[in-house]
Amino acid sequence: MVEGIERKIEVEIERNRIRITIFHGEDEEIIKLNLGEAKELAKELEQALEDYSKRKQIRID
């Protein structure tokens, strides 16, 4: 793993879209979503976080 690479996510409301900017070191990725897409992303992210939390609690012997 490379040390010192900064990661940052910014979420902004534009006129008709939600703009998500993901910074990773010197690179950046911009994603523009309409309201429906943003809601779907929020649902999928919530589900993924819930699944992740459940998996962390499972003990594998």
Image (cartoon, grey):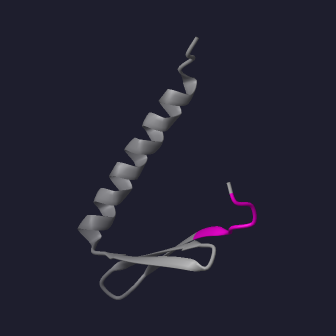
Q: Residue furthest bottom?
A: 15
Residue positioned most to the top:
61
Across and down, in percent, residue 10 comes to 54, 74
Q: Quadrant of residue 30?
A: bottom left
Residue depicted at 27% across the width and 66% down the height: 37
For the C terminus, which image quadrant? top right
Which residue does the image show at 34% across and 58% down from the upper left?
Answer: 41
Given residues 26 and 41, the one toward you in this image is 26
Relative height, residue 43 to residue 24 (above, below)? above
> Magenta segment, which residues?
2-8
Please tell me whether the stretch drawn in magenta is mainly helix, strand or loop: loop
Task: Residue 58: give x, y in percent of width and height.
Answer: 53, 20
Residue sitting at x 41%, y 47%: 46
| Residue 16 location (% of width, % of height) | 30, 84
Q: Is residue 5 magenta?
A: yes
Q: Is residue 39 left or right of residue 2?
A: left
Q: Is residue 28 above or below residue 52?
A: below
For the image shown, how many numbered marks are present on the structure? 0
Q: Nearer the viewer, residue 43 or 5?
A: 5
Task: Determine the residue located farthest toward the front in the rendered image.
Answer: 1
Q: Which residue does the image show at 27% across and 74% down from the upper left?
A: 34
In-front residue for pair 29/9: 29
Above or below, 50 against 60 in this view is below
On the image, which quarter does residue 15 sit in?
Answer: bottom left
| Quadrant including the N terminus | bottom right
Q: Residue furthest right?
A: 4
